[in-house]
Amino acid sequence: MTPSTLALLSLFVPLGAAVLLGLLGPLRRTGRPAAFVSVAGALVALAGAVAILAGGDAALKPGAHLVWGWLSAGPATAVGIHVDGTSAWMLLVVTLVATCVQIYSLGYLHDEPPAALGRYFTYQSLFLFAMNTLVLAPNLLQAFLGWELVGLVSYLLIGFYFRKPSAAKAAVKAFWVTKFADLGFLIGLVTLYAKTGAFEWTAVTPVAGFVTLMLFFAVMGKSAQFPLHIWLPDAMEGPTPVSALLHAATMVAAGVFLIVRAEPLFAQAPMTREIMAYVGGFTALFAACIAVVQTDIKKVLAYSTCSQLGYMVTALGAGDTFAGYFHLSTHAFFKALLFLGAGSLIHAVHSNELKDMGGLFKKMPFSGAVFIIGAVALAGVPPFAGFFSKDLILEAVEHHHLYVPLAALAIAAFLTAFYMTRTVMMALFGAPSHAAEHAHEPGIDMKLPLGVLALLAIVAGFGGSWLAGLTGHEYAFHFTLVGGAGTAIGLLGIATGFWMFGPAQGGAPIKRGMAPVGVFIRYGLMDRLSTVAYGLMLAVGAIIAWIDRYVIDGVMNWSGWILLVGGRRLRGLQTGNVQDYVYAVALGIVVLGAWGILR
Amino acid sequence: MTLDAYVLIAGFMFCIGLYGVLTRRNAIGILVSVELMVNAANINLAAFAHFGRGIDGQVLVLFTTALTVAEVVVGLALVLLLFRRRKDILVDLANGLKG
Amino acid sequence: MTDHILALTVAAPFVAALLMLLVPGRNHPVLRVIGVTGSVLSLVGAIYVALHYDQAKGGLQFAQNYPFVPSFGIDIRLAADGWSVALFLLTGIIMTAGSLASATLTNRPKEFYILLLVLVSGVFGVFVCQDLFVFFLFYEIAVLPMYLLIGIWGSKGKVAPAGPFKSLWKDLDVGGKEYAAMKLTLMLLVGSAAILVGMLAMYFAMGGKSFDMVAMAHFKFPREMQVWVFPMLWLGFGSLAGVFPFHTWSPDGHAAAPTAVSMLHAGVLMKLGAFGVMRVGMILLPEGAATWAPIVGAVAALNVIYGAVSAMAQKDLKYVIAYSSVSHMGVVMLGAATLDPDGWNGAIYQMFAHGIMTGLFFALVGLIYERAHSRWVPGMGGFAKVMPGVAAFFTLAGLSSLGMPGSAGFVAEFLVFAGAWKSGHLMWAIPAMIGAWVTAVYVLRATKMIFWGEGPSHEFHDLHDAKRVEWAALWILGTCIVAFGCAPRLVLDFIGKATSEYLPAIVDAAHLVAMGGGK
Amino acid sequence: MIERLLFGAVSTVLVFTALMAVTTRNLVHAVLWLGMTLATTAMLYILLQAPFLATLQLILYTGGVLSLMLFGVMLTRRSSEQDGVMVGNESNGRRRALPIVAIMLGLLVTAVGRTPLANAPVSPSPTTAEIGKRILSTHLLAFELLSVLLLAAMVGAIVLARRKDASLEGTNDPRERAAALPGSRPAGAPKEV
C-alpha cells in the first residue's frame, strides 16, 4: 500500500470507531466491548503509521499529497493528507502514545460504569482522528480544523468527570483560554487567505510576519506558554491517561508541530522567532519554578510539561526546527511515561498528593522503576532520551546568540532535575503514608504500555540521526561545551534534590518555605488573575445586557407607550354622540369648501 | 326668475336643515331637519332641470323622493326601536359609540 | 407537474392548512398527521429542487409566471436560484423538525398548525419569488401569523422593572406573551412600512409598469434614489434580521414563543430579513448598497459582539439563545456587507447553518422547559445525568454556534471572516471574531450550568430524556449540522453559483461609488 | 313681474316655515311646520313649471311622510308627557352650530355668486308623459333598483320596529325566549310538586 493509503487508514479508522460508538448508543453503553473497538481502531492507525515508515524514506522524500476541494472545487480551500517524513514520524508518535494510553486506560478506568467508559473511548477515538487530521494536514486550513477539534476533545475529556464541579470548571476554562488563543490562528489564517488566496504552508508573502505572530499566539494557548498556560494545570482534573496523552505528549505539542510544519512561513519572520525564543525561555524557567513547589504529583508534571514546551518553543525561536521537533518526540515518550507512571501510583493510593505517597518503590517496583526512567530522561541524564534533545536545544540557542533565553533554559534545566528528584524521593522513597500501605502493582494492561514507553524513553535519543534524515535535516550527536554544561547542571540539580529530599534530608528551612510559596503561586496569583478576568467579562456582559434591556429596549417600549397614551387621550374625541360626528362632517365640508372657493 | 335665485333659496334651506340636524335633541326632530336638507337638494334638481338640463333632473327628483320615503320609514323604525330600548329618543343619550 | 415544482412546494403547507380547516379541532392525531405531512411534502419539494437544479447552467430555474394583478404588472413569478435552493432546504428541514417537535402540543393544535403552515408557505414564497410585490406579500404572510402564535400559545417571561423607563412597566406588562407578540408585530410592521415605501419608490422609478425583480436588477436606478431607498430597505428588512437597535423584539419574542414557533422564527424567519436586504436591497440597488456597506458592516459587527456579550449575562435560557441569534444574524449581515464572494457565500451559508443550529437549540430548550418547568439557568445543574441525549445535542448545537470545525457554523463564520478580511474591513472582522469567542464563553457556561455539576435537585423530579418523535427532530437537525459542516459543498456550491451571478454587478457599482463618478 | 312677486312671497314663506320647523319647541308643531315647508316647495315647483313634481311633492311628502312622522311622534311619547299635547323638542349646541352654518351659508352664497348661473336658458318644460317614458326607458334599471330598495326598506322597517313579546323586552337570547314560553321551564329547575 502507498503511504497515502496507509495515512488515510490511520486517519479514518479511528474516525470510524468514533462514529460507530457515537451513533450506536447500545454498543457504547456496553463499556468494555466499546473500548475494544476504540483500541482496535488505534492499533490499526498505529500499524498504518508503522507501515508508512517501514516503507522507507524514499517514498516519503517528495511527500505524498492528496487533496479534495472542501469549501470550493479548487485546491485553494482543500482538505486531504500530506505524508512526508515530518508528518509520518509525528503520526507514529501520536498513534503509538495513543495506543499505549488507550490500553492503559482499560486498566486505569476499570471501575468506571460501562456507559462512562464507552463515552471515554468514543472521545479517545475522536481525539486520535482529530490529532491525525492536524498531523497529516496538507495546508493550514486543515491544520486549523484539527487544531480546533483536538481542543474540543480536550474539553470533553477534561470534563469527563462532569459531575465534579472542579472538573467542569477546568474543562470550560481550558476551552475558553485555548479558544481565545485560537483567535490568533483564525486571524492568521484569514490574513494568509486574503493575501495569497490559499492556505499553503510554503506560501511566500509579505505578511508572513503578521501571520506567524498570530499563529504563535495560538501556539501560546495550545502549547501552554506564559501567560496563556493557566488552563493546563487545571486540565489535570481529567483522568490521568488523558493528561498523559493530551496534556503532555500530543495535543499540547501540537503547537510545536504547527511551527515545525509552517517552517517556511516562520523562516520569513525573524521578529516572530525572536519573540518565540524569549517567551519560550521565560515559560521554561517560570513553569519550572512553579513545578518545584507543587504538592500534587500531576501538577508537578503539568508545570514540567509547560516548561519543556517552553524549551521546544525556544529552540524553534532560535530557528532550529529539528531541535524542537526532536525534543517534541522524546518528550512525548518520557512525559507520557511519567504521567502513566504517576497514574499507576495514583491508582494505587487514590490520591494525587505527594504526601499521601512515599515508600511506594518497595510496593510497586515496576511502576517505580519506569517512573524513575522517565524522570532521569526528563532531567537530561545521559544516555536517556531527554539528554540528546535537550543538549541539541541548548546548542541551537547558544548558536544563535540568544543568551538570555539560554540562561533561562540552563536554570530551568537545573530546576527540572531538582523537582523531578524531589518528586521521585517524595513519592517512591521515604516513609510510606497511611494510604500507601495497601498499594500494589497494577495489572498487565497497565504495565505493558508503561514498559513500551519506558523502552522508548531509554532508546529514542539514539534515533536522532535517523529522524533528521527522515525530515531532511542534518544531525549527528557530538559533544559540545554547552551541551556538557547543560548535562552537568542537570546532574547538579539531581544532587541538590537528593541532598534535600533523599534519605539524608538536608535543607529543612528551604523545604519548609516551599509549601506556602507554592500555595501562593497556585491559588494566590494565577487563579486570582483568571478569576478576575472572568469576573470582569461577566460584569461587562451584565452591564451591556442591562443597557439593552432597560435603555435600548426601554426606548422601544417608550415609543410604543407614547402611542398607547396618545391613543388613550384621543379616545375622548369619540363621544358616541351622532351629532358630534355630523358636526365633524360639516366642519370638514366647510374646510374643504373654503379651500376650494378661496384658493 | 333666474337660476341663481332658486339655487340660493335651496342653499338657505339646506343650511337651515343642517342647523336643525346639529341642534335637535329629539330623533324625530333630526328627521324633520334631514327632510329639509333633502328638499333643498330637490329644489336644486328641479331648478337645474328647468334651466337647460331637461327631463332628467325631474326624473332624479322622483327618485330622491322615493329614497327619502324609504329613509324616513327606516329612520322612524329606528326611532321606535330606540324608544323601546331607552324609553327616550334623545340622541345625545344614545352614545353607545363612545370610545 | 415538475415544471410547477416551486409553486407546489410553496403551496403544500398552505393546502395542508386548508385541509385542516375541514378536520374537527378535537381530532389531534389527524391534525398532527396532516401538519407533519404538509411539512414533509415541502421538504421533499425542496430536496427535489436541490437535486434537479442544474448547477452548471445556474441562473433562475423552474421559472413560472402566474398572472396576479396584470394591470399593475404584478405576477406571481416563481424561479429558483442557487440561494433559493439552499434556503428552501433549510426551511423544509426546520419546518419538518418543528412540526415534529410540536407534536406534543395539546392546546388548540388545529389553529396552531394552520397558522404555522400558512407562515411557512410565506417563507417558501419569499425565497423563490421574483416579483417584488408578491415578495412583499409572502413576507407579510410569513410575519403576521407570529402575532397569534405567540399571543395565544406563548409563555410568560418576567422582566423586572428598572432603568430610566421604569414607569412604563405598569402600562405595558413587559415580558408577558401579549406584550411580546405585540412588540414583535409592531416593530416588524414599522419595518414593513419602510420596505413598502422603498418598494413603491423603485416601482415608480421604473415607470410603474412592473414589479419584476429581474427587470429591476437590470434597471439602473438613479444614484440619489438608491442612496435613500437602500437604508429604508436595510432597516425595514433589517428589523426582522435583528439589526441593532431594532433587535429588541427578538429576545422577548423568542422567549415568549412556543417551541416550534421559536424554531421557525429564529431558524427561518429572521433569515427572511437578511435575505431581503441582500436579494432586494443589495442586488436591486447596487450603488446604494455600495454607499451604505461600511455602515451596514459596522452595525453588523456591533450586533455580533453586542449580542454575544448580552447573551453572556442572561439568566433565562431562552433569552440566552435569543441573544445568540441576534449575534449570529450579525454575522450574516456582516457577510452581506463585505460585497465579497466569500463574504456573501458565508452570509447565506450562515443563514443556513444558523437556522439549523438555532432550530436545534430552541427544540432542546423547549424540551428542557417542558420537563423542568423552568428556564432559570442558575437553578439548574447536573441534568446530563438524567437527559444525556439532550445534553449531547445541546453541546452539538453549542459547538456549531461557536464555530467548531466539523459543524456547519464553522464554515459560515470562517467564510464571513475571510470575506471581511479580504474586503479590507479588519475593524469589522476582529470584533466579530471576538464575538465568536464570547459565544464560546456563554454557550459552554450555559452547558456547564445546566448539564454538568451535581444535581439535579429535588424540584426537577420529572426530568427524562427525549421521546420518540422528539428524537426524530433532534436527529434530523443534529445530523444536518454535522453533515453540512463536514461536506459544506453540498449547499455551498449552489450558493456560490448564485453569488457569482449577482456579485459582479455590485462590485462594479462599488467601484463606481468609490470613484465618485458614473452617475 | 308677477313671477318675481310670487317667487319672493313663496321663498319668504319657505324660509320662514323652515326656520320654524327647526326652532319650535313643540315637536308636533315642528312636524306641521315641515308640512308647510314641503307644501310651499310644491309651489316653487309650479313656478319652475314642473306640475308633476308639485303633485308628487304634495302626495308623497305632505301626505305620506308627514303623517308617518306624526305617527312616529305619537308612538314615542314619554310617560311624563302623556297628559299634554306638548312634545318636547329642545335644541342644544346652538352656539357651536350657528357659526358653522353661517360659514357654510356664506360659502354657498359666494359660490353661487361666482358661478355664472343667471343667464341659463330656460328649457321647454317636459310633459308628464315624457317623464314617464324617460323613467321606463333610459332609467329603467335605476327605477327597478329603486323598487327593490323600497321593498328592502319596508322589510327592514318591519323587522326593526316589530314589537316582540312585551315580557321579552330587550332580549335576543333564544334560550331565554324559549324559557319564557308558557309550559316550559329552564332546564334543571326543580319540578314543583
Image (cartoon, coloured by chain):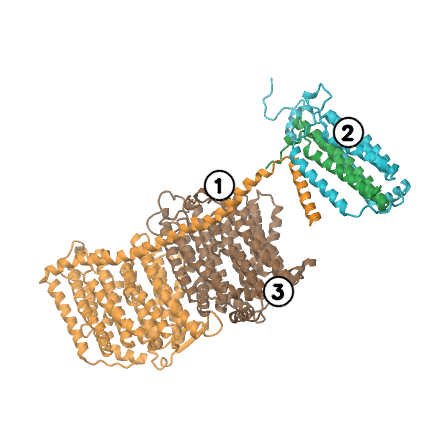
**Residue linked to disc 1:** C171
Q: Nearer the viewer, mark 2 or mark 1?
A: 2
On the question of residue C509 being in view, the answer is yes
Q: Quadrant of residue A516?
A: bottom left
On the question of residue A453 being in view, the answer is no
Q: Residue C207's x, y, as percent?
A: 66, 63
**Vertical position of residue A55 compared to residue D8: above or below:** below
Residue type at mark 2?
A: Trp
Identify by letter the chain in green.
B
**Residue at x 52%, y 46% (from the top left corner):** C182
**Vertical position of residue A404 compared to residue A339: above or below:** below
As helix, strand or loop, the secondary structure at mark 2 comes to: helix
**Residue linked to disc 3:** C216
User: Looking at the picture, do discs 2 and 1 lie on one chain?
Assistant: no
Q: Nearer the viewer, residue A362 or D107?
A: D107
Cα–Cα span, label 2 and label 3: 69 Å
As helix, strand or loop, the secondary structure at mark 1 comes to: helix
Q: Earlier in the sequence, mark 3 or mark 1?
A: 1
Q: Residues within 10 Å of mark 2 (few under 14, many from 20)?
A: many
Q: Nearer the viewer, residue C36 or D71?
A: D71
Cα–Cα span, label 2 and label 1: 55 Å
Identify by letter the chain in cyan.
D
In the rendered structure, the residue with mark 2 lies on which chain? D
Answer with left or right where residue C6 lies relative to residue A208. Answer: right
As helix, strand or loop, the secondary structure at mark 3 comes to: helix
Q: Residue A446's x, y, as percent?
A: 26, 63
Answer with left or right where residue D178 lies relative to residue C103. Answer: right
Answer with left or right where residue D19 lies relative to residue A320. Answer: right
Residue type at mark 1?
A: Asp
**Residue linked to disc 2:** D33
